[in-house]
Image: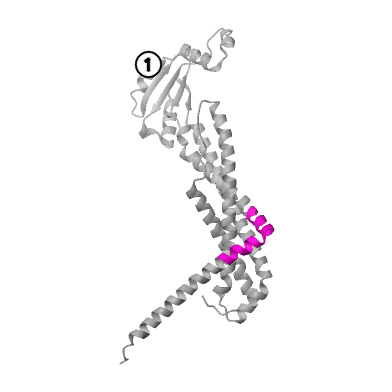
Amino acid sequence: MKAPQHPSHRKRRRRNFGDRIRAWIRHHYTQCYDSLLRIVRTPVNSVVTCLLIAIAIVMPTIFYICTDALQSNEHYWREPITLSLFLHPQSNGKNLAHHLQQLPEVKTVKYIDAEQALAEFKAQSGLADMIETLSYNPLPEVIEIEPTADAATHQQLAALKNKLLALKEVAQVQLDIEWLQRFQQLVMLIERIGTLIALLLLAAVVLVISSMVHWIISNRRDEIEIIHLFGASRAFIRRPFIYTGFWYGFIGGGIAWIFAKLILDWISASLHNLLALYGHTYNLATITPLLGLQLMFGTALLGVVGSWIAVVRYLRHHIELPVNL
């Protein structure tokens, strides 16, 4: 049997472990602070690098906010779904409207005779003088149908449209939601193209930071070789360059935050003035502090990835080190 350890030995072991943890934290703090000072001491290269990062990040940021605003404010263009039935001449529209009201898929029916349709067209088009010169009324009778909520899916609306077209009195059926479906498909296409461009720009950020960190590593090659001779581990050598990439990404994300806010404020003012001409009011969402911090730390993460790629690649090709994490 092993003799029980003396209490002083256990205390010394806990104290040594605590000292190692404190030294590890102190070294991280020193390397983080030293990396920031090195960036400040090379202002030209640092400013150019951070501006390149910001320019690449600001476009995906604006795209994300604009598409999110389109989706979250869909009620601005979503109106009740209606089907407009244009009848053949000499049709009995009133009787047909009464018949359609009995259908289970129909919620409301509105009958508009030819004279009422002409009066509404005069009022809305501003062509009253020109219409007065016509010798006859060219507009047909119209029946507007609002389907029930249970029949508002795309497939059910298409089936209802075909069912109404089969009626002998109906010459044409216009589904007023078709333009919205086309618009949604266009938005989906723009989202996919924007996502592809955003991924390419994010990859460009990683490459920019990786190239910059690789250049810094090349300038500090002698320093790396010296600390390698003293037995420094891979983690010890990587650490300052990882923090350098972190700071480049963090500062670049902060600049992108400022750029995006300025651009969104400028766009929002123009959009507000445009919609005011049509009697609507809408202000484009801006970047909240939470979103801004997410942007900065997200870009910092890209910086860590880029610097990791650069330093691991350099160590693999130039210095042979035992694996010591």
What amino acid type should be assigned to the residue bearing mark 1?
A: Asn
Query: In the picture shown, does residue 62 fall above or below 86?
Result: below
Give the percent coordinates (x, y) of residue 197.
Answer: 60, 50
Which residues, given as a range, are shown in magenta?
33-52
Quadrant of the drawing holding the N terminus: bottom left
In the picture of the structure, the residue carrying the numbered disc 1 is 95
Give the percent coordinates (x, y) of residue 20.
Answer: 46, 76
Q: What's the magenta bit mostly, secondary-structure-wise? A: helix
Q: Residue at x 61, y 52 (%)?
A: 54
Is residue 39 a member of the stretch shown in magenta? Answer: yes
Query: In the picture shown, does residue 250 fall above or below 174?
Result: below
User: Is residue 237 visible from the viewing direction of this image?
Assistant: yes
Could you tell me which secondary element the residue under label 1 belongs to? helix
Q: Residue at x 42, y 26 (%)?
A: 164
Q: In the drawing, does residue 287 fall left or right of residue 217?
A: left
Q: Residue at x 57, y 30 (%)?
A: 274
Give the percent coordinates (x, y) of residue 91.
Answer: 44, 15
User: Is residue 308 visible from the viewing direction of this image?
Assistant: no
Is residue 227 a member of the stretch shown in magenta? Answer: no
